[in-house]
Amino acid sequence: MNHWLMKSEPDEFSIDDLKARKTEPWSGVRNYQARNHLRAMRQGDGVLFYHSSCGVPGVVGVATVASEAYPDPTQFDVKSDYFDAKSALAEPRWSLVDVKFKRKLKRTIVLAELKDRVEMRDCPLIQRGNRLSVLPLTQAQWDFILSLER
DNA sequence: GCCAACGTTGGC
DNA sequence: GCCAACGTTGGC
């Protein structure tokens, strides 16, 4: 089982939204590196849900990958903000996975807590200027982040 | 293939 | 709202 961290702006889609929806197709990723991570996901992989671009950025919940990657339908929807005219039906450019709610953390593990920790040294999340919205975590990073919860 | 211009992300 | 960082686009 692999581990991942997925960012979402809570104004757009929060951990409470995921809790209410139970399972959500993670549409709208339009970055090749993030897409490649989505394609590497397998059902049952662990996901930490991260709130970005908000008052208190940080890890707020746990989810699981609920499907293999499949084509993101919004890329073909001309009415969608995520429509991509250059993507062909025969060879879809963008993929998504279904993400299933597991639990909310007892508290937000804020970004500031994760910075300057040797445990997180190699994690792209804490590197300055990193904008990757889907990124892998090592087992050690996953365990460390969750150990901060209590 | 290079690189300047531009747009977006995301912390602060 | 600002701005640093980075990805993408497009002219050459």
Image (cartoon, coloured by chain):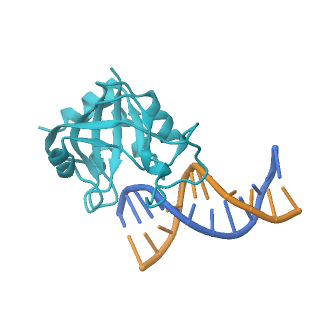
Chain colours: A cyan, B blue, C orange
Give the tally of numbered discs: 0
**Residue drawn 46% across the image and 31% down it:** A39
Which quarter of the rendered picture does the N terminus of chain A lie within? top left
B11 or A64: nearer the viewer: A64
Mark yes or no: residue A100 visible.
Answer: yes
Horizontal relation, residue A18 to residue A139: left or right: left
**Residue drawn 32% across the image and 56% down it:** A9
**Residue drawn 27% across the image and 46% down it:** A113
Which quarter of the rendered picture does the C terminus of chain A lie within? top left
Q: Is residue A114 above or below residue A57?
A: above
| x then y, percent, for residue A59 | 25, 45
Instruction: Identify the image quadrant of residue A97.
Output: top left
Horizontal relation, residue A89 to residue A8: left or right: right
| x then y, percent, for residue A64 | 26, 32
Q: Residue furthest top?
A: A1
| x then y, percent, for residue A49 | 27, 43
Q: Is residue A128 above or below residue C3?
A: above
**Residue drawn 45% across the image and 27% down it:** A40
| x then y, percent, for residue A38 | 43, 35
Mark yes or no: residue A130 visible.
Answer: no
A134 or A13: nearer the viewer: A13
C5 or A51: nearer the viewer: A51
A10 or A29: nearer the viewer: A29
